Every structure is written in C-alpha cells, then in structure tokens.
Image (cartoon, grey):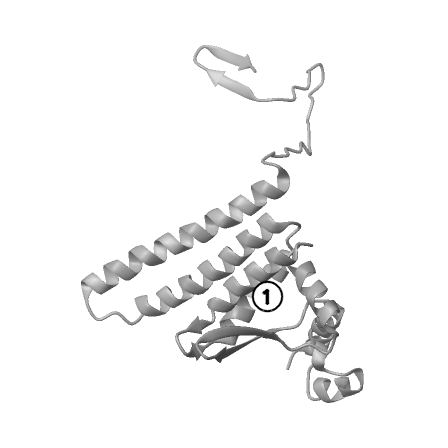
Amino acid sequence: MGGADIKPEQDEAVFDGLTEAEREKVKQTLAKARARTNGPPMGLKMEDGVLNVLHRASHNEAATGLLLMADLGTADPHFHAGVTGQVATLGSHGKKLDEVNSNFVLSVVRAVEPRDELEAMLAVQMGAIHAATMMMARKFNHVDTIPQQDAAERALNKLARTYAMQMEALKRYRTGGQQKVTVEHVTVNAGGQAIVGAVAHGVGGQHEK
C-alpha cells in the first residue's frame, strides 16, 4: 500500500507506536505521496501470445491517457503509445510477466520529470540500465568460476559506467551544455588589485589569462 492509498482518518493507526521522530518522518512521506499527481500504475496481460497493457485507474479513459502523457513529458499520443509498449516489454519474459519491473522503470521516468520526449527516452533507458545493473550484480555475487566472475564483472562495470554517462547526458541536455562558475569570495589586500579569471603559473613568473 502506498502513502496516497492511506486515508487521513487512518493516520493515527499508522502513527501508533512510533517515536516522535518516526512520526514526523512518516508525516512528511505521507504529504509527499498525497501530493503526487502521477498517472496510474501499469498492468500487463498476455492474451493469445499478445502482450496487452492495462492501466488501473479510477479516472475516465481520456484523463488517464493525459496523465500518462504528462508523466512522459509529451503531448504526442503516438510517442506515448510507443514508449508505453517499450516499458511494458521490460516486464515480459515469454509467458512470465513482471509488472513490478515495468512500473519501476515508469517510476524512474516520473522521478526524472521529463520536459520533452528526448528526456523521457533517456529516463526509460536509465531505468532499464539500472535494473540490468542490479541483475548483473546479483549474478556477480553468485558466480562459481573465475571466468564467470570475470564476465560478470566486465558486464557490471559497463552497465554502471553507462548509467553514470546517462546521468551526465541528462544534466548536459538540461543545462544546454553550459557550465556556470560562481565566485563566492574575493580577497583584496591593501594596495592590491582583485583579479577575476584564470591565472596560469609558468616558469619564471605569473601570467594572467
């Protein structure tokens, strides 16, 4: 059960037995959960070999679709349908369905709060790469031979580096590739002159760039 599913009249039952610090932490989490306006969770169903995506929502169909599009940072129904299908397949392994994995990736996208389709696609990839990283970490902890260990270690390192690169790519995209440098303190001695900029120290003296 999520925090948004807990009714205000149930709060006291939730707080029962908690310390004051724990109560405050639970209150903050409940407030955040109730303030979320995410679309509904994804459901998966296999019928005649075809994977169907369901959405468990109390809203009407139009509102549900618009909420899900907002989560993906898009107003294009075709983009929404394509990405939703891609996320759904992450939770499909033959006849075995894993709604938790698909909803995890969807929650990563919502946490990123994509502003456009490119950010949404990157967020989906980040969620998928993280899931693959954790799967490989589990395999790495249960290897039986040195070759298995080496193979798992290489894959784990590649996945971890890929995730770090994705984070950096998202940061660069959102900032337009620009870096902001802020000078917080400038000290000028008596009779001296403040220099703002890069200073290169070379042999035989100091050169101002």
Q: Position of residue 37 (x, y in %)?
A: 73, 67
Q: Is residue 166 above or below residue 190?
A: below
Q: What element does badge 1 sit on?
A: helix
- Left/right placement of residue 70 relative to residue 51 reads right
Tell me if I can see residue 75 in this picture: yes
Q: Is residue 153 above or below residue 202?
A: below
Q: Where the C terminus falls, by quadrant?
A: top right
Q: Where the N terminus falls, by quadrant?
A: bottom right
Amino acid on which the number 1 mark rests in the picture:
Ser
- Is residue 92 or residue 38 the one in the foreground? 92
- Residue labelled with disc 1: 107
Q: Residue furthest top?
A: 204
- Is residue 2 or residue 88 the one in the foreground? 88
Q: Quadrant of residue 26?
A: bottom right
Q: Position of residue 168 (x, y in %)?
A: 52, 45
Q: Residue furthest right?
A: 9
- Left/right placement of residue 132 relative to residue 127 reads left
Q: Is residue 20 above or below residue 162?
A: below
Q: How many marks?
A: 1
- Is residue 107 or residue 88 the one in the foreground? 88
**Counting other residues with Cα less than 10 Å from the Cα at mark 1, is it few (<14), some (14-19), or many (20 or more)?**
some
Q: Quadrant of residue 137?
A: bottom left
Residue at (55% x, 59% y) in the render: 82
- Left/right placement of residue 199 relative to residue 3 reads left
Q: Position of residue 58 (x, y in %)?
A: 73, 78
Tell me if I can see residue 32 in this picture: no
Q: Position of residue 156 (x, y in %)?
A: 35, 58
Residue at (50% x, 56% y) in the render: 126
- Is residue 8 or residue 105 the one in the foreground? 105
Residue at (47% x, 71% y) in the render: 91
